Image: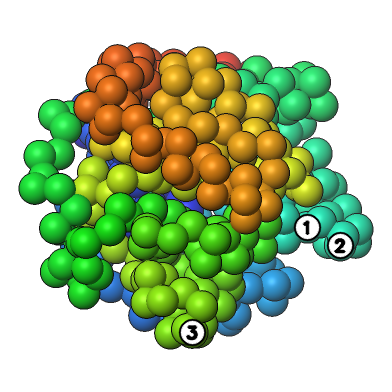
Amino acid sequence: MPRIAVWVSNDLTFDQRVQKTCQSLVNRGWTPVLVGREMPGMKPWQGPWEAHRLPVKAQRGIRFYASWQWALWKWVRRHGLEVDAIWCNDLDTLAPALGWGHRPVVYDSHEYFTEAAGLTGKPVRRAVWLMLERWCMSRLTSMITVNESIAAAYREKYGVEVEVVRNMPVLRPPVLTEGRSVFDSYGIPSDLPIVLMQGAYMDRDRGTAEAVAALPHVPGIRLVLVGAGIEWEEARSVQGEERFEGRLHCLPILPFEELRILTASADVGLSLDKSGHGNYEMSLPNKLFDFMHAGLPMVTTARAEVAKVVEGHRLGVVVPDLEPETLRGAILEVLSMPRKEWTIRAGEARNQFHWGVDEPKLLKVLDESLKAHLRGSQKA
């Protein structure tokens, strides 16, 4: 079977999109070889595929990105001829693959990288990434991204062909739970409705701080944060304060199957990305579909792609701002409707939004990249 290297700049443990992609590739007759990085506190790799975790000299900032590019370059020089293609997840993995040039490359952009929050207000750093992006795009035949807004932006900017493969779950039977009592095993009382917010990166402008600030204004609920990031850490440091009445709970990142059960056991899901960054404005978060597949009603901010799904399929309440009273009203509005009604709506939407709907486009881009590389090799 042909082998395909799948590059991603995390430790491979919790990346559901990469795992779904790999399974799709396996179903098509490919053998994935995963390449990620070493991270503090990472768990041993237990996946079904060969995996390489590369050491880097730093975990963030310029030193990380420089050492990460060098680590990928060394890997491809050493192992590149052992694989038949390279699948690059996000811009920070793309240049070494294209620079090597001996194998077909597929680019799967999980976000609008050069409009990410980490580059806002940092013109020099952003200019470097834009220069690298232009260089890469001039060498691509096609790419994949996660929603139509980001795809349209790349088409307009670079004239490259872009397919949309949304980050949706594989269609499976709904989780059957015994209500919110599942939370008891995590030390979270199940006596009150549970509002759940999840995310591996609860960084600035993801709405975590606003959700925490609103909690004292919404009596009779518990707020559970599952994830990591600076605002998750800040929430954990204050969760014992009297103003929260013991109703704020912080859990670290959980394996997907555990999180899936918790999500189905909650009462309301939150997705509260703010507008200050192009990447957030155009985002279509994974958790939106996780909530949908769990039958969980949601409260979301009015990001264009998010509002289109939530309002179009009546899956929850879209809020115009993140003021405490606004969030209070939205959460209470969701809780006032019988859960059965929300579950019916989510079930209807789930059949339209799942991995199998967009998977053929993912495989189409792989085929096109293989053909383009073959044509280039014949010309050379």
Mark in front: 2 vs 3: 3
Label 1, label 2: how far apart the Cα atoms are: 5 Å
- How many neighbours does mark 2 have within 10 angstroms: few (below 14), some (14-19), or many (20 or more)? few
Say if 357 sits above or below 18 in the image.
above
The one of 312 and 95 positioned closer to us in this rendering: 312
Residue shown at the point (69%, 44%) measured from the top left: 321
Q: Residue 116: horizontal and vertical position, in percent? A: 71, 51
Q: On the image, which quarter does residue 45 sit in?
A: bottom left
Residue 319 in picture, x, y percent from top left = 62, 37
Q: CA distance from mark 2 to mark 3?
A: 35 Å
Q: Residues within 10 Å of mark 3 (few under 14, many from 20)?
A: few
Residue 7 higher or lower than 294, as above or below: below
Quarter of the figure with residue 343 = top left
Callout 3 amino acid: Glu
Q: Is residue 345 above or below residue 301?
A: above
Q: Which residue is the site of mark 3?
A: 241
Q: Which residue is mark 2?
A: 122
Q: Are marks 2 and 3 in contact (CB under 8 Å)?
A: no
Q: Is the C-beta separation of discs 1 and 2 under 8 Å?
A: yes
The residue beneath circle 1 is 119
For label 3, the SS is loop
Q: CA distance from mark 3 to mark 1?
A: 33 Å
Q: Check the image and report above or below for 161 versus 202.
A: above
